[in-house]
Amino acid sequence: MNNDLTQFSEITRNYKKIASELPASVQLVAVSKTHPASIVQHIYDQGQKVFGENKVQELVEKQAILPKDIQWHLIGHLQKNKVKYIAPFIDTIQSVDSEKLLEEIDRQAEKNNRKIKVLLQLKIAEEETKFGLEIHEAKEIFSNYLNGKFPNIEVTGLMGMATFTEDKDQVKKEFTYLKQIFDKLSFQRKLETLSMGMSDDYPVAIECGANSVRVGSAIFGHRNYNL
Ligand SMILES: *Cc1c(COP(=O)(O)O)cnc(C)c1O
């Protein structure tokens, strides 16, 4: 049996199961990082149009050769000097973790004569290593946005990553906290997207109010494919 075909059918099975089990109101961002374009194309052919990547170079390479109606989301930390490479095509930058970065995205969006959607990434995990805004920073950026500071950007929501732990109560607490901030900011201007939950915790995230989940390994597996 062809090994590639076995991998493809396993990924297809994972994808179809997850996509069919998600509530209709929840967006699935298929996180394809480290997996080759051929596999992305395969899942695209099953009907998936939204994909997430965490590295600019990998994203740019895949975007160049894959169907142009894919909505690409950047979900990893973004350096200011790399915004220009993705500004022509990126659908949503989920990982905005500083106002300086937002200023650069606004500039590049204007240059490309388009609007770029962003999510503000909030720090909700206990770990020190995770990128993200403190809540007071997010509030300040959002209020500057409401005052018209970033005319070429649409802040459509918030993103957060929970602590990497087996402790479901801890994870729940962090997701619930982010949902509360989401509701508070939504009171000032309606936000659409609350992105939280990955392969290990997306059911909990949905329980806590997520309407967008970023799922990688549960679809694509952990291995590095060599296709
Ligand atoms: C890799 C990644 C994911 C997906 O992680 P899985 O555990 O493989 O589902 C989600 N969000 C971010 C920010 C990531 O970097």
Image (cartoon, rainbow, N blue to C red):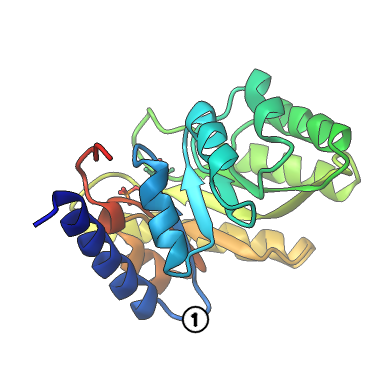
Residue designated by label 1: 24
Q: Is residue 47 toward the left or the right of residue 97 in the image?
A: left
Q: Nearer the viewer, residue 2 or 172?
A: 2
Where residue 23 sits in the image (x, y, percent)? 44, 80
Position of the N terminus, as image quadrant, is: bottom left
Position of the C terminus, as image quadrant, is: top left
Q: Is residue 150 toward the left or the right of residue 65 in the image?
A: right
Q: Nearer the viewer, residue 220 or 169?
A: 220
Farthest residue in the top direction?
Answer: 81
Where residue 133 sits in the image (x, y, percent)? 57, 37
Q: Is residue 141 toward the left or the right of residue 93 in the image?
A: right
- For the point 18% across and 52% down, the residue is 166
- Residue 226, located in which quarter of the rendered image? top left
- For the point 74% across and 40% down, the residue is 141
- Residue 108, located in which quarter of the rendered image? top right
- For the point 56% across and 48% down, the residue is 73
In this rendering, does residue 175 appear at all?
Answer: no
State yes or no: Cβ of the residue under disc 1 lies below 8 Å from any atom of ligand 1.
no
Above or below: residue 203 compared with residue 93: below
The crowd level at tag 1 (other Cα within 10 Å; few <14, some 14-19, many 20+) is few
Where residue 27 sits in the image (x, y, percent)? 51, 68
Q: Nearer the viewer, residue 104 or 67?
A: 67
SS category of the residue bearing label 1: loop
- For the point 23% across and 51% down, the residue is 221
- Residue 157, located in which quarter of the rendered image? bottom right
In this rendering, does residue 194 appear at all?
Answer: yes
Residue type at mark 1 is: Ala
Where residue 39 sits in the image (x, y, percent)? 36, 50
